[in-house]
Amino acid sequence: HLSAQGFPVISIPKTMDNDVFGTDYCIGFSTAVSRSVEAINALRTTVESHERFGVVELFGRRSGETALLAGFLAQVDRTVIAEAPADLDRLIPLLQRDKATDPASYAMCVISEGATLGGSAAGDLSKPASRRSDIGVGRRLANAIEERTGAGTVMQELAYLMRAGEPDAMDRLAGFAFGALAIQLLQRGIDGRMLAVLGGSYSHVPIDTLLGGVKGVDVARLYDTDAYRARLLDVDRMPMFIY
């Protein structure tokens, strides 16, 4: 709006969900993933010692990028993202098999807050939570696991802990770089632009680019909808953050 009124504006993409259309990277994403991986690995010791199913819910109402990458880096058994509904008639047996074949008899699952649950085991749990005060999808998944298997679960909603504290090194670097580029563009008389990382390089695009589409996980390329796992190992000539 300000840019349309002629005010010199440079916008900087900042969201831990990394879902701004027109840029490969948003400030906050790396920190959120780092916090999530650390928390998942910390929780793993409790889940393992109690021989339970672990369910970790991460922010990501419309995009599952944070859950996809955090689950992959923490090497959890299954990851459910916002872009691909989960059939509990398939997911729960997979988790049961993971637990049964693990030497420590436990299994871990990460789920995006915006994920949807389907299948006969879902019952009336299929609808995503409409408000933060509603029972989250992580708790609903944990309840379904307990009802189906009779085994206990450890459920943790990381929520705002994902974005708490100091930024990590990557976000500090991106913040400094975006800030410097914004000032440099304004000094050159250039405005009405959104800063971006494209193909691994800092760049800028028209400020209304973010209105031109929706950014999320490329399910066909990066996610196995049958196994509920990331497919991120074909990395030749891929950008650093894969997306």
Image (cartoon, grey):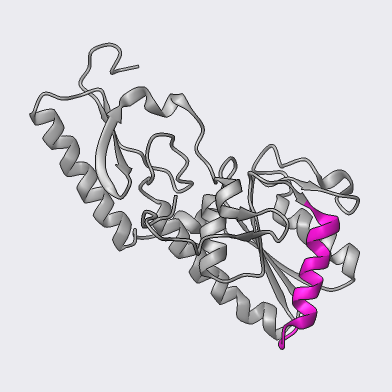
Query: Closest to the observer: 164 or 38?
Result: 38
Look at 72% across and 51% down and name the residue there. 137
* Whether residue 38 is situated above or below residue 205 in the rendered picture: below
Q: Is residue 130 left or right of residue 215?
A: right
| Quadrant of the image occupied by residue 47 | bottom right
> In the image as oriented, which residue stretches furthest toward the front?
236
Q: Position of residue 183 (x, y in %)?
A: 14, 36
Query: Which of the image's four quarters has the N terminus?
Result: top left
Q: Is residue 239 left or right of residue 182?
A: right
Secondary structure of the magenta portion, mostly?
Answer: helix
| Quadrant of the image occupied by residue 206 | top left
Look at 78% across and 60% down and name the residue there. 91
* Whether residue 95 is situated above or below residue 190 in the rendered picture: below
Residue bounds of the magenta highlight? 87-105
Query: Closest to the observer: 139 or 205?
Result: 205
Q: Position of residue 88 (x, y in %)?
A: 82, 55
Does any portion of residue 164 appear in the rendered image? no
> In the image as oriented, which residue stretches furthest toward the top?
5
| Quadrant of the image occupied by residue 230 | bottom right
> In the image as oriented, which residue stretches furthest toward the bottom?
103
Look at 25% across and 55% down and name the residue there. 173
* Whether residue 17 is situated above or below residue 189 in the rendered picture: below
Taking the magenta stretch, the answer to whether it contains residue 52 is no
Taking the magenta stretch, the answer to whether it contains residue 93 is yes
Look at 57% across and 69% down and name the residue there. 40
Does any portion of residue 181 appear in the rendered image? yes
